[in-house]
């Protein structure tokens, strides 16, 4: 099995494959459009399209979704990812702690996965609220979380380590999942793998503080399919009648994830 590799590290050269990201961003005027466009321009994306009327930002390039979100949020505006890549090419995994000490703040990470062709994908991994150090992510054979990470089986695909060294207060990605008050440190890595999303649905991602070993306090989450670009255009939920922004506020106020 081929090991995954961190993009452009250790002298490895990986040609960045492009994919599309669709985001909802609340904008009120042309100055908002200018601010978002100006912020994203240094990222060297191949295209940036900002639709003021629909409150949509569409980008194309080889940049991590978390980087796009963080860059927009630094302008003072929120950003919600509504789709990435082609239909049936994207997945998401929320990483949680099953340790009793984290009962009130279990969410510690988020992995966004997107295929860029039939054999390759990128994993945008962001973690938060952890002790400083090196952590070892892997995709596991099973999505069985009956015993947390301990019940996920053997390694299906190993991933490169992630360094967690930045104070948690600087992480906006995991804050959006309701874990902004969690102390500790954060980290982000954009990982490459020779896999397809179809191979991964129902399996799990585990993040361990120990190399080649899973422990009771290892983070874990099940990989689920997510929307491709332009597949999720609803602004109002047909069930609740609330907008995506109202549902966002409700989720954060209740500490809900996702």
Image (cartoon, grey):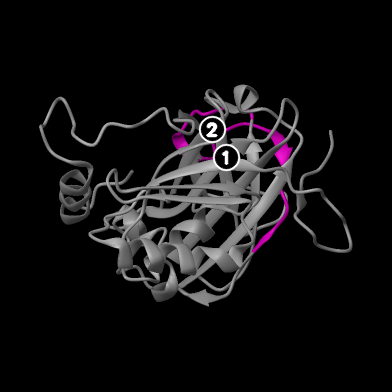
Residue 255 visible in rendering: yes
Report which residue position mark 2 lands on. Answer: 90
User: Callout 2: few (<14), some (14-19), or many (20+) C-alpha neighbours within 10 Å?
Assistant: many
Stretch in magenta: 141-162
Q: Position of residue 150 (x, y in %)?
A: 54, 39
Tell which of 219 and 229 is nearer to you.
Answer: 229
Q: Nearer the viewer, residue 3 or 213?
A: 3
Q: Is residue 129 visible?
A: no
| Mark drawn on residue 113 | 1
Which element is circle 2 on?
Answer: strand
Asked whether residue 48 is drawn in magenta, I would say: no
Instruction: Look at 57% across and 39% down and name the residue there.
Output: 113
Vertical relation: 63 (above or below) 148: below
Identify the residue at image location x=76%, y=35%: 194
Q: Farthest residue toward the right?
A: 11
Q: Quadrant of the C terminus?
A: top left
The vertical placement of 43 against 193, above or below, is below
Foreground pick, 211 / 79: 79
Q: Residues within 10 Å of mark 1 (few under 14, many from 20)?
A: many
Residue at left offset 40%, top offset 58%: 174
Q: Earlier in the sequence, mark 2 or mark 1?
A: 2
Residue 6 on image: x %, y %: 74, 55
Distance Cα–Cα, label 2 vs label 1: 6 Å
Q: In the image, residue 105 lies at what x, y percent? A: 31, 58
Does dot 1 land on a helix, a strand or a loop? Answer: strand
Q: Residue 163, position in %: x, y?
A: 64, 67
Residue 30 placement, left or right of 231: left
State the quadrant of the N terminus.
Answer: top right
């Amino acid at each position: 099995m081929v090991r995954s590799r961190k993009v452009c590290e250790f002298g490895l050269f990986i040609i960045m494959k492009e994919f599309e990201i669709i985001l909802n961003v609340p904008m009120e005027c042309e100055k908002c459009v200018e601010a978002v466009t100006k912020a994203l321009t240094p990222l060297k994306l191949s295209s940036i399209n900002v639709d003021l009327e629909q409150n949509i930002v569409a980008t194309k390039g080889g940049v991590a979704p978390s980087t796009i979100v963080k860059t927009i949020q630094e302008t003072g505006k929120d950003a919600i990812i509504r789709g990435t890549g082609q239909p049936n090419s994207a997945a998401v995994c929320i990483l949680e702690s099953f340790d009793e000490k984290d009962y009130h703040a279990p969410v510690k990470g988020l992995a966004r996965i997107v295929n860029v062709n039939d054999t390759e994908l990128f994993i945008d991994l962001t973690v938060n609220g952890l002790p400083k150090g090196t952590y070892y992510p892997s995709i596991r054979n099973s999505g069985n979380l009956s015993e947390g990470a301990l019940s996920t089986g053997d390694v299906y695909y190993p991933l490169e380590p992630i360094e967690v060294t930045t104070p948690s207060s600087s992480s906006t990605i995991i804050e959006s999942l309701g874990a902004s008050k969690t102390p500790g440190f954060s980290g982000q890595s954009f990982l490459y793998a020779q896999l397809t999303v179809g191979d991964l649905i129902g399996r799990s991602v585990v993040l361990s503080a120990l190399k080649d070993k899973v422990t009771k306090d290892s983070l874990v989450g099940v990989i689920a399919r997510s929307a491709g670009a332009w597949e999720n255009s609803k602004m109002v939920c047909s069930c609740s009648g609330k907008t995506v922004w109202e549902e966002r506020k409700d989720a954060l106020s209740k500490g809900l994830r996702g």
